[in-house]
Image: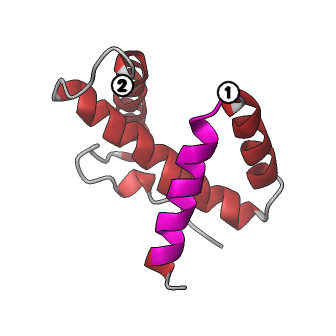
Amino acid sequence: MTDSELSNQVAKDLASAMNSYSAGNNAKVILYKLMNEHPTIQQAFVGNIVFNAIRMMAKKYEEHNFDGRNQMACKICYDLWKSLSDTANKNYGRTHTTNDWMRLPLI
């Protein structure tokens, strides 16, 4: 299986886990497992998945590309992204348009 095929399968499996009656419990199990992985994997998860998900949902909000099912998530991500960007600009002198501050170092 190639990296691309694996990524597509993981995304499909995650979507399936979130689209069930036990989505809340599934999310807890998935996060518990990830937070007990090697710290480098945790760092990669936050930098590559969490930050990018927030950024992408914020963009949906800016572009009014949402409906009632994901409006609140988009708005929360928009507010988070603005706060994260402001903090990064203040503390690291970088703009949110470069996304450099999202690239957390991996050891």
- Residue type at tag 2: Cys
Outermost residue, left direction? 63
Q: Residues within 10 Å of mark 1 (few under 14, many from 20)?
A: few
The label on residue 95 is none
Residue 85 shown in magenta: no
Outermost residue, front direction? 21
Task: Give the residue pinned by disc 2.
Answer: 74
Query: Magenta segment range?
Result: 5-21
Instruction: Please tell me whether mark 2 sits on a helix, a strand or a loop.
Output: helix
Residue 6 shown in magenta: yes
Q: Which label sits in the foreground, 1 or 2?
A: 1
Nearest to the observer: residue 94 or residue 73: 73
The label on residue 21 is 1
| Residue 98 coordinates in the image, percent (x, y) | 25, 54
Q: Quadrant of residue 65?
A: top left
| Residue 57 coordinates in the image, percent (x, y) | 35, 34
Query: Left or right of 36: which side holds 77?
Result: left
Residue drawn 40% across the image and 16% down it: 72
- State which quarter of the image contains the N terminus: bottom right
Outermost residue, right direction? 36
Magenta segment main secondary structure: helix
- Residue type at tag 1: Tyr
Q: Residues within 10 Å of mark 2 (few under 14, many from 20)?
A: many
